[in-house]
Image (cartoon, helix red, strand yellow):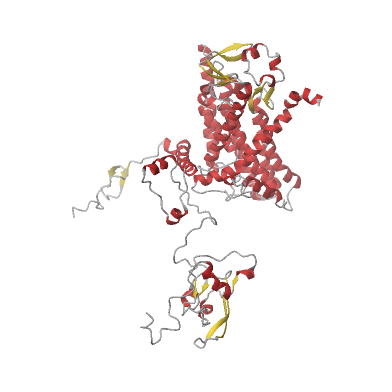
Amino acid sequence: MDWLSNNIYAILDNPALKWLLLIMVMVMPLASLLTWAERRQSAMMQDRLGPNRANIGPIKLKGILHFVADAVKMISKEDFIPGSVHRGLFALAPILAIAPVLIAFAIIPFGPTIYPHSYTSTLDVLGLATDPAAKPFADSIRLQVASFDYGLLFYFAVLSIANYGGVVAGWASYNKWALLGGLRSSSQMMSYEVAMGLSLMGCFLLVGSLEPGFIVANGASSQMSGANPLNWLWLWQFPALILFMTAAIAETKRAPFDIPEGEPEIIGYFVEYSGMRWGLFFLAEFIEIVFISAVIATVFFGGWQVPFLDADGFRVGGYVTEINHQWVSTGGWVLKLPHAAVTALQLGAFGLKVILLAWFQLMIRWTLPRFRADQLMNLGWKVLLPCALGWTMLTALFKLCAIYLGWL
Amino acid sequence: MASHAHDDHEPTTTGPKVLATSTVSPKVRTIAVVRPSEQQVSYLAATKAGLGITLKHFAKNLFGRRRTVDQLNKGEHPVPTTAFQKALSVVSPVNDIETIQYPEEKAVYPERFRGLHRLMQRDDGQVRCVACMCCPTVCPAHCITIIPEQSDDNGIEKRPAVFEIDELRCVVCGLCVEACPCDAIRMDSSTHAKPVEERADAVMTKEKLIAVSKENGKNPTSIATQGGVGPNWRERG
């Protein structure tokens, strides 16, 4: 036990453990709840009640337990594998669909850095910047699984593997319709990946970093506190927000971009799948919704930042000073809060932002009708891509002028 | 004829703008074509408009109150009258959800709804059916089985020993009710065939059909006079 108590912070700082906690505590419950929330929300939008009857005895909770019932149903269903499928690839495809999304969560900063030795007191931000090795700041735990300099490029790289999920499923199924669905899936994903990557280039140019943790901590400009909502990128990169959201919804393969699947009408790539293998494709979509919400929250809406809440408390009218190449908010009127309270508020803010953005994606999904294949390609290549390129150039021009004029 | 405001030859105000008309035929015209504006055809404007509509429905149905079953059955939208109701309708308006949550809540069937069959009884409790075989003859689904027997009652010639209706075969057409000469079979029970676990349970026997009246709170006797009107019809009142 001595060993455990001596190394507890090192264990908690383990990336694998943090990733597991993030997936098990936040992502999977939220994704499973979304399967119920989507049906309930669409019902509300269409003047219906939706699934509200699943219960354990008298516990009904407006039908929230439907996701448990669904999981039990899918796990206990017959795992039917048609005779002529390629068994290896058939088994691999659902894993290829779901694994990249879960891996990509590694780059999402879901909370601030925790300093366990000073969680009851207000965090001494000036002391932290001048002497990070001091006792109260030791054993810090960064609430981000992996902090790469290439940050969001990792997300683009890993999520492009998810393309193979659809294609391999279509190919392995030995079914012409499934194969066509897989081809539609790959053409759509490849088209929209280009626009998705390019739409974020302006953000990278403006912030000067690809690392989502850095984007969250500093915002658009280091001249302002990262907790100021006016410093978040939604204001400075609003066209990029719309472009990225459109492309990202296309990447989730849901309406209005559900040409690969087209659940009832055009047969999709997972037509030969049943039971939990199909459930994995289904769950992957919902995890992608959570992931895209997390990315949009991180890049455009300040991630875990609560408006006007700096590391030492709520601050109005402060200014930013540079100490040891770090920007620290000081001055102004401050409502000092203990470190634990600040952390809890910031974690809650991140969860709330993700939930609201997921809700918004469901609104979009149940509002718009499906695109035709040619409309889809036109929108991707002729609208989103040029717009993203143009916006990148505009941002570059703006940054150049700003540097020339001495604003940055 | 001047009073006819909308003559065929009168130019309409809402049509396209006519630039020139042919001298040969007034129907051949050059008109100014109005193309939809960029804003009207753009995905963003349409998305915004659509989101407005769905958001309105979502908010109203999420925060609003459901109508009562009675109001849903009558198709009524309550109009707030008192000041309190008006204030409440601002905070929590009555929503548009039409769902009636069967089986806790039940829709009231219309008066002429053709439901589960029931066999009527005479005033003394005997079954009204005289086994005339009209209903099994007319039944297009052949779901009625009647085996007649001699009645104990001297005034009555026949009665059904067996009267069975297979509710799985019944097409609920109501022809048996139309065919019945003595108001013995009716479909006005305001309920429907119960779900069963075995096919045999779906066959309604004579006893079950008689019991339907009591189970659904219906009068098992008919207003039709028993045994014909006879010579003393004035005294019956």
Q: Residue furthest left?
A: B2
Residue B3 appears left or right of B176: left
Residue B91 falls in image quadrant: top left
Rendered view: A22 above or below A135: below
Residue that appears at 55% across and 45% down = A40
Q: Nearer the viewer, residue B163 or A395?
A: B163
Q: Position of residue A280 (x, y in %)?
A: 68, 43
Q: Position of residue B125 (x, y in %)?
A: 52, 78
Camera-nearest residue between A49 and B170: A49
Q: Quadrant of residue A112?
A: top right
What is the x, y in percent for residue A234? 52, 26
> Is A28 placed left or right of B175 in the picture?
right
- Up the image or down, B37 lies above or below B204; here it is above
Could you tell me which residue is drawn at 42 percent across and 42 percent down? B88
- Percent across and percent down for residue B123 are 48, 78
Quadrant that contains the N terminus of chain A: top right
The correct choice, above or below, for A111 with respect to B71 in the image is above
Left or right: residue A186 versus residue A371 is right
Q: Is residue A381 above or below residue A302?
A: below
Check the picture and name the quadrant holding the C terminus of chain A: top right
Is residue B24 at least partly visible in the picture?
Answer: yes
Label tally:
0
The answer to whether residue A194 is seen in the rendering is: no
Q: Quadrant of residue A95?
A: top right
Q: Nearer the viewer, residue A175 or B69?
A: B69
